[in-house]
Image (cartoon, coloured by chain):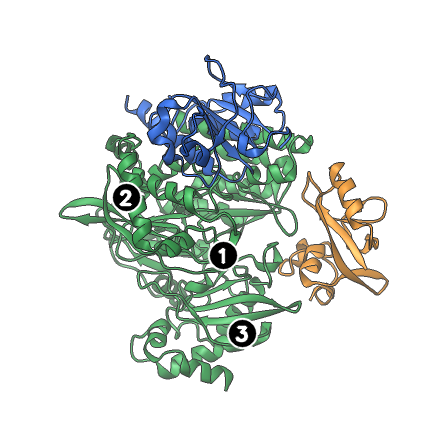
Chain colours: A orange, B green, C blue
């Protein structure tokens, strides 16, 4: 599957296209295979996202998980600062990333 | 240290308002991201892996306690309570919002700081010797020359859209503590027959194609050296490659033309530019020098240090450096606690360092390119008080220039260019050596880690260098040996096939084992490597 | 390019986007390439591309009334050097920046000696005004008449 991601123009936060809107949680991301360019163009023109691009992902325990480690680090936060990630209380989150 | 006059302040203030206007136009859609990107980069604002990242300039690494307090306040107010000191003697914040960026720049301008030209294809923040003004071996304090170049290069109308970024370092001693020859231009202020002049080294750099800069002019008179720099830049701006980003640095131009031909073109341009009267008068250099006069040293300060506390004595031995003034040392605050993140400091730690600088170091701090902080002028008699306060705050690691004093770029944990994580490798290595207790016995050992080929972690210049690469989606680490950024500059060579994350920690331990077995008295790791060559290390690693 | 003129020919003065800081009449014919100009053309207007050596024009500055310096992409800064080199050599005619000329480059271009701008895209008047008024001082001498800060400090 393909996910569309980018950054919020104002805040810089990493965001994922959910099919109707942008979310900071990769778990909310929708498969955009085939439509990525069109959605990216439209959303960027509306300045609802900055520099969007599509990545590969697979389903993992019912939620999309990016295929490449860089995108997984990006989705979650720095592995060396679990307290600053989106899931600071999850002790197993490192296994999801690596 | 240098203080702004109304002119300097007006320029920085104008820049803040310019950026505020540019950010507004971006948010309103009047600028595309392609148009905005170089503008925000020239104000230090990147779009990184998780958010915007802001890099703040610390010109030639020097700052005072008021400025360090302001950096701490920014960390608390606009970021997440910490900052990262970099190999370019700057500080960067990882969690910045575009809508806050102009306000941060405005806060910085109130303490005579900025983020001007800390990124982008322009002349970057000028770096220098972190012991400038304190080192026993310097010919002269290099910082006034760096400040003169800072002003010359700020908002330079001709050189703001160069083929690629441009980094200048200025030193003034035989010992090179600023990786001078690994810069686009390295300047060494030297003395010849009682006269001072500038030796120009051009075309060095790390990155994808590491090069050691050749000397193109051994002595440029001080009343012409800005003009000479202008000539170096003009030849580069006109003829540096723009067809391929990876070949656009000046080192490639110098290599392709040959140092001799590049020098000929510079000299030709220099001769023409001399007629243009663009050189600031020596009076301006003298004015700037006035700001860098020695502080009011206690001429009666004693040399005695009470070494009865062994932990303190170890810190003194490892983390203090000889000073030109009797009774004083430069004290290095390690930002490399065992298992910690190299170069990171919390807002609280920044405030403590600021207060200690005010109390014990004539209100001055330096950022080292090795991602530590220096209090340049500390009375030996004050060292125990200083160390106690540092140690209580987790800033007392006695590991300057040891295997624990690792340079590491932010790597894949923060950087969108990275291929592998650097910080966890640094953490594991420092933990391993702290556990085996070998840190001290291995002596001076400079270990440097980059998470990609751009080499922000200076791996080419490490006695031991580590480069993270992406091998089919899995992090992999190449080991290299024999680099040095100092006056004995050399580029490290790769040992062979790479290692996994845990494998690289074992590999570092293996090569230090070879060193322990082979070393002769007084030899550093680097000396042993240079004497015995790569073969014994390879054998231990791969056979 | 937003008009129909072939790039090598340059363009006339009246595309509607021209910003000009000169009192004399604009040249009324298109600019020729540097090669064509050096090849014995009678043109008084020439167009310098980023890869051209502006110094080749220096022996002929007397008969030039317009030099266009093309910026095919705003990030290619060679044209700044071309402009300054011509002014340093004494060129006093019109020096016009054309192409991908954006509002945030105008002030630096002016400092390098440009006195006319013909951008591909229309520039907002207020933004242009703000850009030229931006810098209260300058740190270095260039091809304009501004006095550098160091000269004021020691004046």
Q: Image point 61% across, 24% down: which residue? A: C123
For this orientation, the residue located farthest to the bottom is B543
Q: Is residue C133 above or below residue B528?
A: above
Instruction: List the residue tagged with mark 3.
Output: B505
Residue B416 in the figure: left or right of residue B177: right
Q: Secondary structure at mark 1?
A: loop
Residue B267 tag number: 2
Instruction: List the residue tagged with mark 1.
Output: B456
Chain label for disc 2: B
Q: Is residue C66 above or below residue B124?
A: above
Tell which of B150 and B245 is nearer to you: B245
Residue B206 in the figure: left or right of residue C151: right
| Percent position of residue A37, x then y | 77, 48
Say which of marks 1 and 3 sits in front.
1
Q: Secondary structure at mark 3?
A: helix
Of the numbered discs 1 and 3, the one sitting upstream in the chain is 1
Of the numbered discs 1 and 2, the one sitting upstream in the chain is 2
Residue C6 tag number: none
Can marks 1 and 3 be said to lie on one chain? yes
Q: Secondary structure at mark 2?
A: helix
| Percent position of residue B481, x then y | 43, 72
Can marks 1 and 2 be said to lie on one chain? yes
| Percent position of residue B129, x then y | 34, 51
Q: Quadrant of residue B410?
A: bottom right
**Residue B67 shows in the view:** yes
Say which of marks 1 and 2 sits in front.
2
In three-dimensional space, the C-alpha distance between marks 1 and 2, rounded to whole angstroms, equals 32 Å
Chain label for disc 3: B
């Amino acid at each position: 599957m393909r996910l569309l991601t980018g950054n919020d123009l104002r805040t810089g936060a990493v965001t994922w296209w959910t099919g109707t809107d942008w979310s900071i949680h990769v778990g909310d991301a929708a498969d955009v295979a085939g439509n990525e360019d069109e959605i990216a163009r439209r959303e960027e023109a509306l300045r609802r996202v900055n520099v969007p691009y599509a990545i590969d992902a697979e389903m993992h325990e019912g939620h999309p998980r990016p295929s490449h480690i860089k995108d997984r680090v990006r989705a979650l936060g720095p592995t060396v600062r679990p307290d600053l990630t989106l899931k600071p209380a999850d002790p197993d989150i490192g296994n999801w990333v690596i | 240290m240098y203080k702004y006059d109304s002119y300097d302040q007006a320029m920085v203030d104008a820049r803040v308002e310019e950026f505020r206007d540019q950010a507004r136009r971006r948010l309103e859609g009047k600028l595309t991201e392609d148009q905005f990107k170089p503008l925000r980069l020239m104000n230090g604002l990147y779009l990184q892996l998780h958010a915007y990242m802001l890099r703040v300039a610390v010109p030639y690494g020097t700052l005072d306690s008021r400025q360090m307090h302001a950096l701490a306040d920014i960390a608390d107010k606009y970021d997440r309570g910490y900052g990262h000191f970099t190999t370019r003697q700057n500080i960067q914040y990882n969690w910045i919002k575009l809508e806050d960026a102009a306000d941060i720049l405005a806060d910085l301008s109130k303490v005579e700081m900025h983020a001007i030209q800390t990124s982008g294809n322009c002349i970057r923040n000028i770096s220098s010797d972190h012991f400038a003004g304190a080192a026993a071996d310097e010919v002269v304090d290099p910082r006034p020359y760096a400040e003169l170049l800072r002003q010359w290069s700020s908002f330079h109308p001709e050189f703001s859209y160069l083929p690629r970024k441009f980094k200048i370092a200025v030193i003034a001693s035989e010992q090179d503590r600023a990786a001078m020859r690994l810069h686009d231009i390295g300047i060494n202020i030297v003395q010849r027959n009682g006269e001072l002049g500038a030796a120009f080294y051009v075309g060095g750099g790390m990155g994808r194609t590491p090069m050691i800069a050749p000397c193109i002019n051994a002595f440029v008179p001080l009343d012409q050296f800005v003009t000479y720099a202008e000539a170096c830049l003009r030849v580069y701006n006109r003829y540096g490659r723009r067809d391929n980003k990876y070949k656009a640095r000046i080192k490639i131009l110098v290599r392709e033309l040959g140092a001799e031909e590049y020098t000929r073109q510079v000299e030709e341009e220099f001769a023409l530019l001399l007629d243009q009267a663009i050189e600031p008068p020596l009076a301006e250099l003298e004015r700037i020098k006035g700001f860098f006069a020695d502080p009011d040293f206690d001429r009666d300060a004693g040399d005695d240090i009470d070494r009865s506390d062994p932990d303190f004595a170890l810190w003194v031995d490892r983390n203090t450096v000889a000073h030109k003034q009797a009774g004083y040392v430069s004290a290095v605050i390690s930002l490399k606690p065992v298992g910690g993140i190299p170069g990171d400091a919390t807002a609280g730690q920044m405030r403590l360092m600021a207060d200690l600088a005010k109390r014990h170091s004539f209100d001055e701090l330096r950022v080292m390119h090795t991602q530590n902080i220096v209090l340049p002028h500390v009375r030996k008699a004050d060292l125990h008080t200083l160390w106690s306060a540092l140690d209580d705050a987790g800033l007392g690691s006695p590991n300057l220039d040891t295997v624990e004093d690792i340079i590491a770029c932010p790597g894949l944990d923060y950087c969108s260019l990275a291929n592998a994580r650097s910080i966890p490798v640094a953490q594991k290595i420092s933990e391993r050596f702290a556990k085996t207790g070998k840190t001290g016995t291995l002596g001076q050992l400079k270990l440097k880690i980059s998470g990609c080929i751009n080499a922000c972690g200076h791996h080419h210049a490490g006695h031991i260098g580590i480069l993270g690469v992406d091998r089919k989606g899995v992090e992999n680490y190449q080991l290299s040996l024999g680099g040095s950024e100092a006056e004995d500059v050399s580029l490290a060579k790769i040992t062979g096939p790479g290692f996994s994350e845990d494998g690289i920690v074992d590999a570092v331990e293996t090569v230090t084992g070879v060193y322990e077995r082979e070393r002769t008295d007084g030899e550093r790791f680097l000396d042993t490597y240079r004497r015995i060559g790569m073969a014994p290390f390879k054998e231990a690693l791969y056979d | 390019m937003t008009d129909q003129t072939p790039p090598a020919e340059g363009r006339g003065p009246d595309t509607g986007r021209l910003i000009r800081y000169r009192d004399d009449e604009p040249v009324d014919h298109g600019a020729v390439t540097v090669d064509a100009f050096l090849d014995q053309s009678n043109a008084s207007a020439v167009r310098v591309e980023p890869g051209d050596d502006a110094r080749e024009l220096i022996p002929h500055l007397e008969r030039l009334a317009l030099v266009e310096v093309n910026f095919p992409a705003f990030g290619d800064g060679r044209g700044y050097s071309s402009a300054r080199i011509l002014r340093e050599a004494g060129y006093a005619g019109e020096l016009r920046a054309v192409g991908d000329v954006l509002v945030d480059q105008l002030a630096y271009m002016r400092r390098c000696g440009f006195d006319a701008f013909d951008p591909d895209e229309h520039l907002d008047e207020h933004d242009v005004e703000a850009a030229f008024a931006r810098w209260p001082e300058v740190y270095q001498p260039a091809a304009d008449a501004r006095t550098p800060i160091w000269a004021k400090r020691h004046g």
